[in-house]
Amino acid sequence: MGEDASLRKSETATLHRALELGVKLIDTAEMYAEGGAESLIGEAIAGHREDVFLVSKVYPHNATSDGTPRALERTLKRLRTEWLDLYLLHWRGDVPLAETMEAFLKLQQSGKIKYFGVSNFDISDMRELWKVSEGREAATNQLLYNLTRRGIEYDLLPWLRERHIPVMAYSPIEQGRLLEHSGIRALAKKSGITPAQLALAWLLSFKDIVVIPKTSSPKRLEEDYAARQIKLSREQLEAMDELFPPPSAPQALEML
Ligand SMILES: NC(=O)c1ccc[n+]([C@@H]2O[C@H](COP(=O)([O-])OP(=O)(O)OC[C@H]3O[C@@H](n4cnc5c(N)ncnc54)[C@H](OP(=O)(O)O)[C@@H]3O)[C@@H](O)[C@H]2O)c1
């Protein structure tokens, strides 16, 4: 969002519809449209700040002791808010994890962020994070997770579950590519739902997965939001495992 001026109207309308529907979480990052996404969201949610759980992310190269609070100030200004609900390190960079986590903790203590966490952290990164005392306060690991990207189920997801750390599943419909899969299309048709709803309902069948699809269309937003009401049967879940088998060996974490 915020990248293409010709989409601004429909992106804003989508955010307004999201507020009307009661969508609770909006995910963004300083990287998206180089601040343009945050500015668009800030304008669209003005006057509704208390209604949403606002998530943003710091660039790894900004995630230093001094750089993190400065990046957050810019983010808060663009989002027109005094605080973030969740602030994430977008991916692992060169800044020592202890430095970033300490910066996050200070921002939490000052009330400018409610929670902090990480994104795109593989199991080895999580193990390192766990050696940093503030790192154990991480509220989530936002990861690429959808039917075609099930690698995390082998070791990372169980590791996180043991520690009660919820995953935020990004690109849940594989940036739209999943919707062209013939198996998904056939199963969705048989189930009387759309391919997007099937892909989202699969992720939502796990109680500890937060799902963050993106759309710039109010109509598709309604379609995606309705996936919350869909409860897949055991037969449907088994059919999906056949189409997209879970991993049988460790896989390096994928990112988009
Ligand atoms: N932490 C990270 O590194 C990271 C990386 C990537 C993404 N993310 C987060 O995850 C969010 C979602 O990921 P994403 O945008 O990469 O992928 P996505 O949500 O899997 O897919 C978005 C694409 O699917 C289309 N779409 C959505 N609903 C649809 C529907 N019902 N029917 C047909 N097409 C539909 C959208 O088009 P329209 O807009 O035209 O509807 C858009 O092109 C992002 O907005 C971002 O907040 C995080």
Image (cartoon, rainbow, N blue to C red):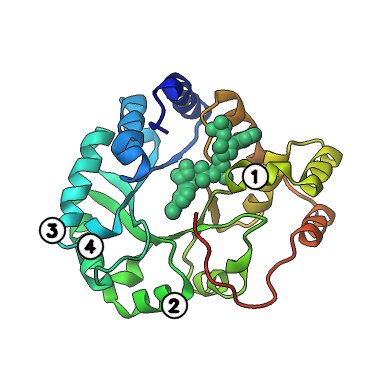
Classify residue 170 as left or right of residue 48.
right
| Residue type highlighted by circle 1 | Arg
Quick one: label 1 or label 3, which is nearer the N terminus? Answer: 3
Residue 184 versus residue 177: which sits nearer the camera? 177
Give the distance between the C-alpha atoms of the residues marked 1 and 4, in whole angstroms: 38 Å
Which residue is labeled 2 in the image? 124
Identify the secondary structure beneath mark 3.
loop
Give the distance between the C-alpha atoms of the residues marked 3 and 4, in whole angstroms: 13 Å
Ligand 1 within 8 Å of disc 4? The answer is no
Identify the secondary structure beneath mark 4.
helix
Q: Nearer the viewer, mark 2 or mark 1?
A: 1
Q: Are marks 4 and 2 in contact (CB under 8 Å)?
A: no
Give the distance between the C-alpha atoms of the residues marked 1 and 3, in whole angstroms: 39 Å
Q: Are marks 2 and 3 in contact (CB under 8 Å)?
A: no
Give the distance between the C-alpha atoms of the residues marked 2 and 3, in whole angstroms: 26 Å
Residue 105 bears which disc, if any?
4
Identify the secondary structure beneath mark 1.
helix
Residue shown at 36% from the left, 35% from the top: 37
Residue 53: quadrant of the picture: top left
Residue 54: quadrant of the picture: top left
| Residue type highlighted by circle 4 | Leu
Quick one: label 3 or label 4, which is nearer the N terminus? Answer: 3
Give the distance between the C-alpha atoms of the residues marked 2 and 1, in whole angstroms: 29 Å
- Evaluate whether residue 69 shows in this view: yes
Q: Nearer the viewer, mark 3 or mark 4?
A: 3
Q: Nearer the viewer, mark 1 or mark 3?
A: 1
Ligand 1 within 8 Å of disc 1? The answer is no
| Residue type highlighted by circle 2 | Ser
